[in-house]
Amino acid sequence: MTDRARRPTIAVIGAGFSGSLVALHLLAAGASAPRILLVERASGFGKGVAYSTRHGAHLLNVRAGNMSAFPDQPSHFLDWLRSRNEPADPSGFVARATYGQYLQDILSQAAKGSDAVGRLVLVADDAVSLTRLPDGSFRLTTDVGRSYAVDGAVLAVGNFPPDPPAGVDKDLLGSFRFRTDPWAPKALARIGQTDSVLLLGTSLTMVDVALSLTDQGHQGPILALSRRGLLPRRHGPATPPPQPQVPPAIGPSLASSLRLVRQAVREAAVEGRSWHAVIDSLRAATVPYWHSLPTPVRARFLRHLRPWWDVHRHRLAPQVDERLRAMMAEGRLRVVAGRLERLSTGTADDLQIRLRPRGQPMAEELSVLHAINCVGPGGDIAGTQDPLLRGLLDAGLARPDPLRLGLDTDTQARLLDRAGHVVPGLYAMGPIMRGTSWEITAVPDIRVQAQKLAAAILA
């Protein structure tokens, strides 16, 4: 009997947080664990884009006490910090680079363990195709031409690259004046200390870029532009609520759900509690609530409520918020609510901006030396040029979810083919499931989903 006949092989494509956790949970099955191919295109396993930053000012947006990689070991991350003689304040906010080291360390320890011998194979390459064979298994091919026979695969490919915002001239997309991806290597390297900069977007990505510019010595004016001009809210006090918070009884009507949440916030204020606990209480209810919503209602949420949900749900560490407010008070950072009508090459060595401030009939024109796309992860997966995803879509082994935010899956994270049927052996994990599960981007949510998915695969 061959080894493959005795032990199925599962490819986990993407070794960021999502993929690494799935691999770790599969490996924890011990003797019954499948053989795992952990495939990662980037140089380091375990980190992903979010935790690959080396910038000390880029902090986690969740308190350290809730950042364990394992839901059944809540103090795991804090214990790891203590083992390195580092501060382990449960209410503190740790640098994302430190968390990246944590993820790499637990993956490294697992790879060296006895359970991993012959069962965990790290493949430092880009997965470019996944072909279904007549017997129902798959052929995985990597960029350098290696080929692997696998019985199933988990797509944990993370977020898509940012899409260029509407209004940006196509001839700027290859220019050093316009950075399409703020996370690309040396994306900020050619920005001078006094250069004027436009940041398109006012979310967490904008905050990271603004702090990075400041810490590399930039002193020039920064203009941050988004439709509503909303900034991420600040985390509240670290004091725990006096009793477990029961989420408001939200239902299929967005209007009534919004009224209930606002009512709960008002009641919390009367009791001396902040709105933060009310929003946090929704975490456990968010995924089943999203599953219950018809597609047109989900679309309305994205159009009207998503910006407000994002700034209240994904918040800033207090020290980051203080730095951002100081930049605004000094006049170095100006946040504008409005629509970009055009960004084009100016008459001199600059960029020309035409924007319409929110609620104003007249457009404004100004110029900057650099512009950076901070609108966040890309959206419409139907237009992806990623060879792996493009091949699956073209072969009918996958389809976009109805909102085209990611791949369509059932509630058990199994991929649905072009006809809407489950594809045995193919699974999705992490942000690529945003359209079907919504809250699948933060560590506390991903770690639970990773554990559930591993259990389903083992079963």
Image (tube, helix red, strand yellow):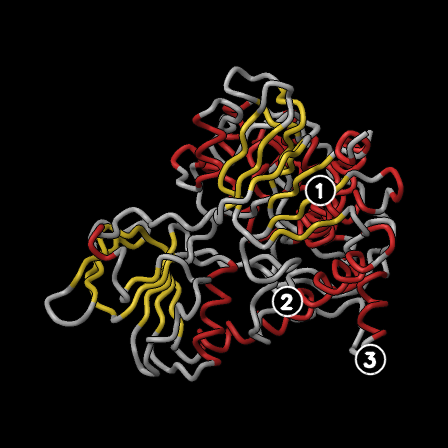
Q: Looking at the image, can residue 266 be seen? A: no
Q: Which residue is mark 1?
A: 282
For marks 2 and 1, the one nearer the N-term is 2
Residue 265 or 132: which is nearer the viewer? Answer: 132
Q: CA distance from mark 2 to mark 1?
A: 25 Å
Whole-percent x, y for residue 332 in the image? 39, 77
Q: How packed is label 2: few (under 14 Cα within 10 Å), some, or many (20 or more)?
A: many
Examine the rendered structure and indicate whether residue 250 appears above or below residue 207: above
Q: Quadrant of the C terminus?
A: top right
Q: How packed is label 3: few (under 14 Cα within 10 Å), some, or many (20 or more)?
A: few
Identify the mark at residue 85; answer none if there is no mark. 3
Q: Which residue is mark 2?
A: 96
Residue at coordinates 46% horizontally, 32% vertically from top-left? 391
Residue at coordinates 58% horizontally, 43% vertically from top-left? 431
Labels 2, 1: front one: 2
Examine the rendered structure and indicate whether residue 280 appears above or below residue 224: above
Q: Quadrant of the N terminus?
A: top right
Q: Amino acid at mark 2?
A: Arg
Residue 182 or 242: which is nearer the viewer? Answer: 182
Residue closest to the far front: 1
Contact between labelled residues 3 and 1, with CB atoms less than 8 Å apart: no
Residue at coordinates 69% horizontally, 46% vertically from top-left? 446
